[in-house]
Amino acid sequence: MIRPLKLLLPFATLPAIIWLLLLLANANAKANALTGEASLYNEADNVINADTETLLPYLRTTPKGKLVQFINIFCGDCRRFAPTFKDVARELYKWRSVISVYAVDCAQERNVKICRDFQILHTPTLRYFPPAYSGNGLGINIQTTMPEEIIDLLAGYLARDTDTALLHFEPLRPDSTANATIAEHRGHGHSEDYIALVLQPRGSNIGRDTILELLPYPAVAVRILDDVQIFANFGLAAHDQKLAIMDLAGNILALKALQETSQAYAASIAEFLAQMGRTPWPPLPTTRAPKISTIRNKEKLSILATVMREAPRVYRADLEQSIDTLLHIELPKAGLIEGNNLTDLRNIISVLRHNNPLNKDGQLLLTGLHDSLLTIDRLTGLEFMELVKSQEKGLGNVFKAHRYVGCIGTRPFLRGFTCSLWTLFHYLTVAAAKQPHNLEPGSVLDAVHGFVKHFFGCTDCAQHFLAMAEHNHIELVADHDAEILWLWEAHNEVNSRLAGDTTEDPEFPKIQYPSEMDCHACRNENAEWNRIEVLKYLKSIYDTKNLSSYGLPTAWVF
Ligand code: FAD
């Protein structure tokens, strides 16, 4: 039923397209190898990892439908959705002649551009692109994460968009006969030796779904009948007929299926084909039970061992990483920044300018950004990125470690950015409470709230945090100490929700912080919080002077 690719493409362009696809595959593999980026998906899942360089060429040149998932590797919902998406992608392997599946990680700096261009405001975001996508438009949002619904929507799009020379989703005409159908089949250059006839009553998609179900069988094309009477034109008794198969000599056989489902219809046709010695394409090999990968890199292992051995510390490297990611990835992903969004951008930069653990050049960078933003009424994420780059010109290296230390996870995808962000937020509340007070009480929470509302790429985190801000009355926080404690309580609320979740690193369990062992005085004999002691503990552990520089390059100038 599926004609070879070459029949779809102008002859002269085929080598060029194959060459381009090979180039893309190679670029993709190289990019992952160079960055050492772990990815949630791979080709064994029937998912191709794409990025700023490769996504558009894939979308434009692959003559099939395209399903793209935009993710943020640090977003819990993306990681929780990954097993489901793998199931969907594996299921779609059957349809690989008409659809390809891609994933783009918006948390990677090199993907900021493509995620901004495609206006990815939430993750995970699923988009469908038609075979003839020319680069215009952002694709169709698939607003469900239920596998059956995704597959059903895709079936509808593919039936609408797939070249009729490839698959016939439109029903046969009422006057169709065996000879006319065979002639049309040959006329379209189809190479299949059999034509299955499937009755699709009004309002049903059973014919459409049988066509898709049988894609792995190169020996059969499927035609839909929307009226049982048409079977009579093929020499079959029209009464109660639902399924039949015909060879190209016009010999026709009525088939029975165990149920009225596309799977049962396809099974019945497959059984017939097997008797004729016709086999399907091999299925996607089942991957072995996923081995839980652990860190192998020696340097990381040594950091992990040190962090786990030492008493709890706050590491400068994590704070640096969070600011680096904010400036170079999270904030530049925005579209147009104006009005409240601009105020929120100015607020987070202002809070960072006042209190940050960066070196002298880092201070200059943040001051330059802060001052420039005051002179601008509106800007895009791209312009913000350019502003950052222009401010960085002439400065020394601000972000040196490029690694998580206290936020290192024991497995890929665990901890990292969101851990460093919490760490930064706590650090900022504690720094703001120190004399001389250079920020109004509530300024840090205000900035955090604005950032989370308008810029945080972790959609589920943002939704939960904003709801928590409302029910825990963030607006009532009136002094610096209350600000520290509000954030501590909020974080514990998140910890309690996520304890035991699949996104939890078993070596760093979500506890009600601080632990009994780390701060005995923080709880009274009834295990209730002693807020005065908690405040003391937080002010000590998040104090600038107690930060650990472990994991940073040694030649470090503050
Ligand atoms: P984290 O929870 O990230 O904590 C980082 C470090 O902060 C800990 O190692 C510890 O040293 C310290 N710490 C822990 N608790 C406290 C506390 N109460 N007070 C002070 N210090 C503390 N993920 C989701 O799946 N769903 C969500 O809704 C969600 N909401 C989030 C909201 C925000 C604002 C942020 C920044 C992140 C959110 N996350 C959410 C991510 C999640 O909270 C964790 O960051 C992630 O699971 C990584 O956890 P972790 O083990 O590294 O520790």
Image (cartoon, rainbow, N blue to C red):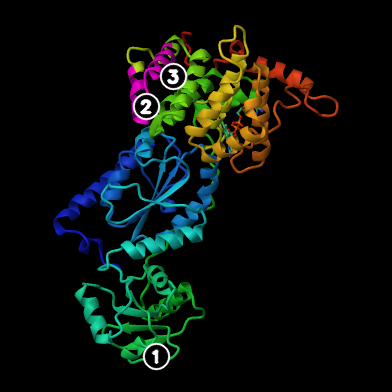
Residue 385 higher or lower than 277, as above or below: above
Disc number lying in front (1 or 2): 2
Ligand 1 has an atom within 8 Å of the beta carbon of the residue at disc 3: no
How dense is the environment of label 3, judged by Cα within 10 Å: few (below 14), some, or many (20 and up)?
some
Q: Quadrant of the N terminus?
A: bottom left
Q: Report the number of numbered marks.
A: 3
Quadrant of the rendered structure where residue 276 is? bottom left
Boundaries of the magenta span: 364-390
* Distance from Cα at disc 3 to Cα at disc 2: 27 Å
Q: Which residue is mark 1?
A: 238
**Looking at the image, do the residues carrying marks 3 and 2 touch, with CB atoms under 8 Å apart?**
no
Instruction: State the residue at coordinates (21%, 64%).
Output: 7
Q: Secondary structure at mark 1?
A: loop
* Distance from Cα at disc 1 to Cα at disc 3: 75 Å
Residue 22 higher or lower than 255, as above or below: above
Q: Is residue 495 visible?
A: yes
Question: Disc 1 or 3, which lies upstream in sequence?
Answer: 1
Quadrant of the rendered structure where residue 515 is? top right
Q: What amino acid is found at the position of numbered circle 1 in the picture?
A: Ala
Q: Which residue is mark 2?
A: 378
Q: Residue furthest right?
A: 525
Question: x, y percentage for residue 184?
Answer: 23, 78
* Distance from Cα at disc 1 to Cα at disc 2: 68 Å
Relative to the observer, which residue lies in front, 214 or 460? 460
Residue 274 higher or lower than 150, as above or below: below
Quadrant of the rendered structure where residue 327 is? top left
